[in-house]
Image (tube, grey):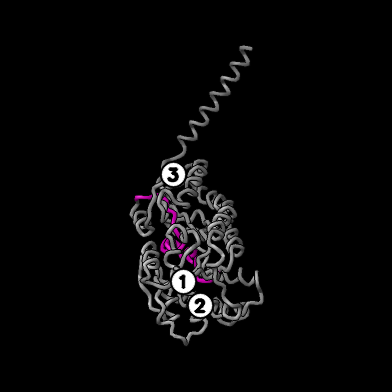
């Protein structure tokens, strides 16, 4: 009996020592997290789970919440953060390839997005994730971005470009050239704004159109801006993503690949969360675009993507890959045989 007890004691001691060594090996790093709701938001909650997983890859992440992704990006650049998580729109300045994932109209559905993220999470795609000194170590869906309007009559205006789109007021993010380019092509006057102020202006009636994932409908109380005649256009502007970026030299060699594989495993869970927010928007608010008019939207988004590619804002290789994904899902699309390919 004594030998058994001694044996158990030694085994327990080994477990304790092993656990202690794991803790020692996990270096403390700072992860700056953008979430409009700060430490109480859904993205911050996701990063809490990510923090637990990262312990197994040698990093003890200390989370720091930000309600401004511009500030989070600035602090990351300045070295106050070893890692950062924010939207793909903001990540474009660190990696133009993955930062083009949120291109206007490039991925019509979550199924398209999953094909692409699955490909980008493979070891073969790892070189594309690095843009020294930075590395993209995770891409997670935030949700499809929809247009919120305060007057459903704007749909008919959209269908007929000759009916004076100039009367429509729209807020655009002041740090996203894609939004500025889109409204320029439409001939719509825009009001530059931060992401949070954009929704405040919509609710105050200062602009007629805003956009974002369904999660902001409740979080930013957009039903106030939609009023009685407004709605949500059921036609995704883009597939928004959360991207986690590290300063590569500060982390273990295999951290990036393990992190990307973990992020891919979270895809279905993240989509279910996004869809749950979409389901919370009452059916009467959803506005459908006639199939005949959808081509106009596709054409406008495509012109926007090509223009921004030519200006060096969108990455041409990413646009080509996303086109391949669209044509794989629907080979009958007009762009699949078009001469001016993305």
Q: CA distance from mark 1 to mark 2?
A: 9 Å
Dot 2: within a 10 Å radius of its alpha carbon, few (fewer than 14), some, or many (20 or more) residues?
some
Segment colored magenta: 80-106
Q: CA distance from mark 1 to mark 3?
A: 40 Å
Direction front: furthest residue: 228
Q: Which residue is mark 3?
A: 61
- Rendered location of residue 298, percent (x, y): 55, 77
Sequence-first disc among 1 and 2 = 1
- Determine the secondary structure under disc 2: helix
The mark lying in front, picked from 1 and 3, is: 1
Left or right position of 181 against 264: left
Q: Residue at x 45, y 34 (%)?
A: 24
Q: Which residue is mark 1?
A: 149
Direction bottom: furthest residue: 162
- Residue 276 drawn in magenta: no
- Rendered location of residue 214, percent (x, y): 50, 61
Q: Which residue is mark 2?
A: 155
Q: Is residue 31 above or below residue 235?
A: above
Direction left: furthest residue: 78
- Determine the secondary structure under disc 1: strand
């Amino acid at each position: 009996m004594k030998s058994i007890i001694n044996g158990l004691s030694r085994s327990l001691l080994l477990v304790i020592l092993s656990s202690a060594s794991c803790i020692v090996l996990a270096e403390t790093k700072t992860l700056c997290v953008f979430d409009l709701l700060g430490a109480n938001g859904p993205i911050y909650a996701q990063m809490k789970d990510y923090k637990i997983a990262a312990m197994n890859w040698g990093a003890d992440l200390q989370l720091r919440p930000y309600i401004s992704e511009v500030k989070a990006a600035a602090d990351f650049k300045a070295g106050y953060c070893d890692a950062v998580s924010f939207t793909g729109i903001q990540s474009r300045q660190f990696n133009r390839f993955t930062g083009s994932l949120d291109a206007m109209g490039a991925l019509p559905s979550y199924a398209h997005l999953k094909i692409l993220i699955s490909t980008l999470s493979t070891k073969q795609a790892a070189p594309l994730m690095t843009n020294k000194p930075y590395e993209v170590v995770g891409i997670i869906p935030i949700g499809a971005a929809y247009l919120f309007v305060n007057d459903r009559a704007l749909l008919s205006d959209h269908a007929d470009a000759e009916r004076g789109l100039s009367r429509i007021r729209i807020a655009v993010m002041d740090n996203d050239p894609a939004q500025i380019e889109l409204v320029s092509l439409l001939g719509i006057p825009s009001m530059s704004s931060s992401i949070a102020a954009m929704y405040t202006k919509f609710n105050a009636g200062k602009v007629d159109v805003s956009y974002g994932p369904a999660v902001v409908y409740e979080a930013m109380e957009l039903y106030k801006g939609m009023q009685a005649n407004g709605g949500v256009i059921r036609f995704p502007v883009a597939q928004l993503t959360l991207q986690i970026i590290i300063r590569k030299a500060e982390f273990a060699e295999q951290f990036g690949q393990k992190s990307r594989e973990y992020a891919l495993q979270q895809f279905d869970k993240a989509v279910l969360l996004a869809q749950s927010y979409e389901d919370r928007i009452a059916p009467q608010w959803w506005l459908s675009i006639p199939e005949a008019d959808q081509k106009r939207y596709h054409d406008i988004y495509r012109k926007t993507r090509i223009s921004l590619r030519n200006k060096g804002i969108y990455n041409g290789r990413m646009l080509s890959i996303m086109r391949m994904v669209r044509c794989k899902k629907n080979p009958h699309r007009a762009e699949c045989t078009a001469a001016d390919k993305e």
